[in-house]
Amino acid sequence: EVQLVQSGAEVRKPGESLKISCKGSGYSFNNHWIAWVRQMSGKGLEWMGIIYPDDSDARYSPSFRGQVTISADKSISTAFLQWSSLKASDTAMYYCASETASGYWYFDLWGRGTLVTVSS
Amino acid sequence: DIVLTQSPGTLSLSPGERATLSCRASQSVSSRYLAWYQQKPGQAPRLLIYGASRRATGIPDRFSGSGSGTDFTLTFRLEPEDFAVYYCQQYGNSPGLSFGGGTKVEIK
């Protein structure tokens, strides 16, 4: 089955670090772009960044550059999104999404999301 | 960066009615690189349309996309399962991609 499986919900305190994951299967994960998308509660979709797992070429939205790090481990078909110092405003649902056929940056495959809660 | 503005913010319609959703870009979207997604509560978005007018795999033909340049439209005749939030997304212009703010289609 073609799918993206995201890691489970996380609860952290402000200032803590976090790394969430997105594992692909059923298709050539390493040769397709993987994006990370933030959705705050009741709000719209925000593009954070994108990575090509085969060579770890990562691009960032100007709004998120320097705030998060996107990486990938092609040996395990997994992409990651990490924070070094979380803020309460990072509380949101985070989706990974992939294009699976075109190479263009629209996304026909989505994970179910990872809910990150940052609270003291 | 390209800013996408969707209108209306909320659309109240009855099943069987025609929904017309607008997505306007702050500058021309290259090569009609415009996609539409549907998101239902508690679910991830689902790709409906790419390339402004091409239906994604498995999407019913009641959904159609049109437009070019800075003005794009998603239209469909409403079935009960279509009540959701719809987002447009451009992917043709540097530095990356961007989403519109969404249109909620609710039951009248």
Image: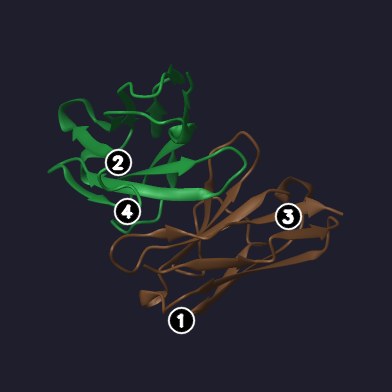
Question: Residue sitting at 21 percent across and 39 percent down?
Answer: A30
CA–CA distance between discs 2 and 1?
32 Å
Q: Which mark is residue A61?
A: 4
Q: Amino acid at mark 1?
A: Gly
Quadrant where the image shows the N terminus of chain B: bottom left
- In the rendered image of this protein, which colour is used for chain A? green
Tell me the subunit letter for badge 4: A
Packing grade of label 3 (10 A; few <14, some 14-19, many >=20) is: many
- In the rendered image of this protein, which colour is used for chain B? brown
In this image, A7 relative to B54: left or right? left
- Establish whether labels 4 and 2 are both on one chain: yes
Q: Amino acid at mark 2?
A: Gln
Q: Amino acid at mark 3?
A: Val
Residue A34: x percent and y percent?
Answer: 31, 43
**Where on the picture, by quarter, is residue A5?**
top left
Q: Which mark is residue A67?
A: 2
Residue under pointer 3: B105
Mark in front: 3 vs 2? 2
**Local secondary structure at mark 3:** strand
Quadrant where the image shows the C terminus of chain B: bottom right
